[in-house]
Image (cartoon, rainbow, N blue to C red):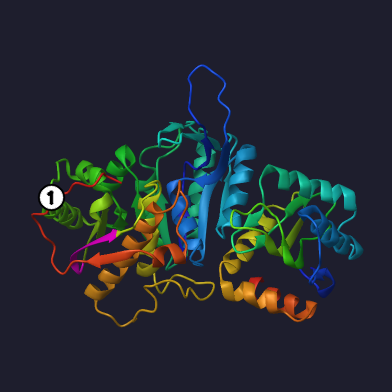
């Protein structure tokens, strides 16, 4: 079972406007509402592949109810933690020329009691063999050590821990030792640079940085490199691959889809599928494969899911058919001198 | 606790002109089964929810639903509409309609039902089995086996 934790979720409302004019009444031609938040995206991507997943989210106000319903309709089991403040709505204004303007609310401030309830709910969901995936920024009122403090208690319950965050919250996580370090992190290039405190101009530099984090005690580092693909550095060494789609539309949520794709393979046999996923190109797969083969399988799924997400508008998460349309290349050797040019994702 | 779905809550091959008509047909069955106390009151709650946001899902699915004080017990009604009826999904009309009715204040039970159903409905094979079901008892058996508990 894969449990995601999104401490600062929201609704993403996208409005289509011919042209945004400041200081005047702008009438939208159309719009849509999607669940928003990195952990939520991971759950949505897993659920769209029929993989059982639970999303732990603080929810409040009318937008909180809408969010829980939207998530349920995509097949995600919601473990809500009721909070007094209203769940936020983030507005994206999309113009035909490709210009997007984002207006983000800060989100509700959580009280100490609400934070305690959130922690208790996550720990309760973390049965042995569960993968707990903490993603995204922290809401107001939540200490920067929130993720860092959760890791050891989750490990004590027999869960595996994945953290995908940035800034102070991630620095606090990486400052941990031993049992308090996550099993997996999924930085993008920018976040990896932040973690090691230097620029990483080449693939070789990325692998070195990831190895450095492994030396500190993070078992696996999956770095997403945008258009340059992704590198997986773990016990079986470094594996590098790329994926292409014909027409990239939106990189929003692509990193989350990439993480979900990785987990769909790496969390086996602890993932429960609700039925056949015939269109998934990476099934079936041998269970007795070597660690190196497993790493390649996991990275292949990650790249396919991540690239598929870029072929979809907004933060839409890929379904098996979208993933099947992606061509993935796993390189036999990691070309250390390769210069990285893709945008950080 | 009573069953979530029973044979009398299954309508096969109905012809309707719009989503409110099929929702009404199902709600009437729920009322006849004693699961809904006030037909118009319940339909008002379903309509209010439907107006917030369409409940159509990709693959020919409509899931009208509401928590309502006029519902006595969590219930799932099912209708098959071969010609399709619009539920606002981007990829076209719905052939498989699920009406989820939950008592007001029943926590997140209706969301759990919705999530389980949605996870199953991703699979073509599950949808096909409902499209091919020969009678109400088959539908009840499929849903009870696949979606519950």
Q: Please tell me whether mark 1 sits on a helix, a strand or a loop.
A: loop
Q: Nearer the viewer, residue A152 or A258?
A: A258
Residue located at (49% from left, 71% from top): A272
Give the image location of residue A131, x and y in percent. 41, 62
Residue located at (42% from left, 71% from top): A280
- Residue with the mark numbered 1: A339
Q: Nearer the viewer, residue B147 or A101?
A: A101
Q: Does the magenta stretch mainly form a helix, a strand or a loop?
A: strand
Res B97 → quadrant: bottom right
- Is residue A155 among the parts visible in the rendering? no
Q: Is residue A240 magenta?
A: yes
Give the image location of residue B19, x and y in percent. 76, 55
Quarter in which the N terminus of chain B is drawn: bottom right
Residue located at (68% from left, 74% from top): B130
Give the image location of residue A219, x and y in percent. 25, 61
The span shown in magenta is A235-243
Q: Chain of mark 1?
A: A
- Is residue A147 among the parts visible in the rendering? yes
Residue located at (45% from left, 48% from top): A313
Give the image location of residue A165, x and y in percent. 34, 45
Q: Is residue A201 magenta?
A: no
What is the residue that sits farthest to the top in this orientation?
A23
């Amino acid at each position: 079972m894969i449990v995601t934790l999104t401490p600062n979720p929201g609704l993403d409302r996208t409005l289509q406007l011919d042209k945004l004019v400041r200081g005047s009444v702008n009438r939208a031609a159309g719009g849509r509402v999607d669940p928003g938040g990195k952990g939520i995206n991971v759950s949505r991507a897993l659920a769209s592949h029929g993989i059982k997943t639970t999303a732990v989210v603080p929810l409040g106000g009318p937008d909180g109810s809408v969010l829980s319903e939207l998530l349920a309709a995509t097949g995600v089991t919601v473990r809500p933690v009721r909070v007094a403040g209203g769940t936020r709505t983030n507005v994206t204004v999309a113009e035909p020329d490709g210009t997007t303007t984002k207006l983000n609310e800060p989100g509700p401030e959580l009280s100490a009691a609400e934070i305690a309830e959130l922690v208790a709910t996550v720990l309760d969901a973390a049965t042995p063999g569960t993968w707990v995936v903490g993603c995204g920024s922290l809401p107001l009122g939540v200490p920067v050590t929130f993720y860092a403090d959760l890791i050891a208690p989750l490990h004590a319950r027999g869960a595996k821990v994945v953290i995908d965050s940035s800034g102070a919250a991630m620095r606090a996580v990486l400052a941990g030792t031993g049992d308090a370090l996550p099993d997996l992190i999924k930085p993008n290039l920018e976040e990896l640079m932040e973690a090691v405190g230097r620029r990483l101009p080449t693939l070789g530099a990325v692998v070195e940085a990831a190895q450095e984090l492994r030396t500190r005690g993070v078992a696996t580092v999956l770095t997403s490199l945008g258009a340059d693909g992704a590198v997986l550095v773990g016990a079986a060494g470094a594996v590098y691959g790329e994926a292409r789609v014909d027409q990239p539309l939106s990189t929003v949520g692509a990193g989350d889809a990439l993480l979900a794709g990785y987990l769909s393979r790496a969390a086996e046999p602890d993932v429960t599928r609700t039925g056949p996923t015939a269109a998934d190109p990476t099934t079936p797969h041998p269970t007795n494969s070597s660690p190196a083969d497993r790493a390649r399988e996991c990275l292949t799924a990650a790249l396919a899911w991540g690239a598929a997400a870029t072929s979809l508008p907004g933060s839409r998460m890929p379904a098996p058919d979208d993933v099947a349309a992606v061509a993935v290349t796993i390189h036999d050797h990691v070309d250390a001198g390769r210069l990285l040019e893709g945008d950080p994702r | 606790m009573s069953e979530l779905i029973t044979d009398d809550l299954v309508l096969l091959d109905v012809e309707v002109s719009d989503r409110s008509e099929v929702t009404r047909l199902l709600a009437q069955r729920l009322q006849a089964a004693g699961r809904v106390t006030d037909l118009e009151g319940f339909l008002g709650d379903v309509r209010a929810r439907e107006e917030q946001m369409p409940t159509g899902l990709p693959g020919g699915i409509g899931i009208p639903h509401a928590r309502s004080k006029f519902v006595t017990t969590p219930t799932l009604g099912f209708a098959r509409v071969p010609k399709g009826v619009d539920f606002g999904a981007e990829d076209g009309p719905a052939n498989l309609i699920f009406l989820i009715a939950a008592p007001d204040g029943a926590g997140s039970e209706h969301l759990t039902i919705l999530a389980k159903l949605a996870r199953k409905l991703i699979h073509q094979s599950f949808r096909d089995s409902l499209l091919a079901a020969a009678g109400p008892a088959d539908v009840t058996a499929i849903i009870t086996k696949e979606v519950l508990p």
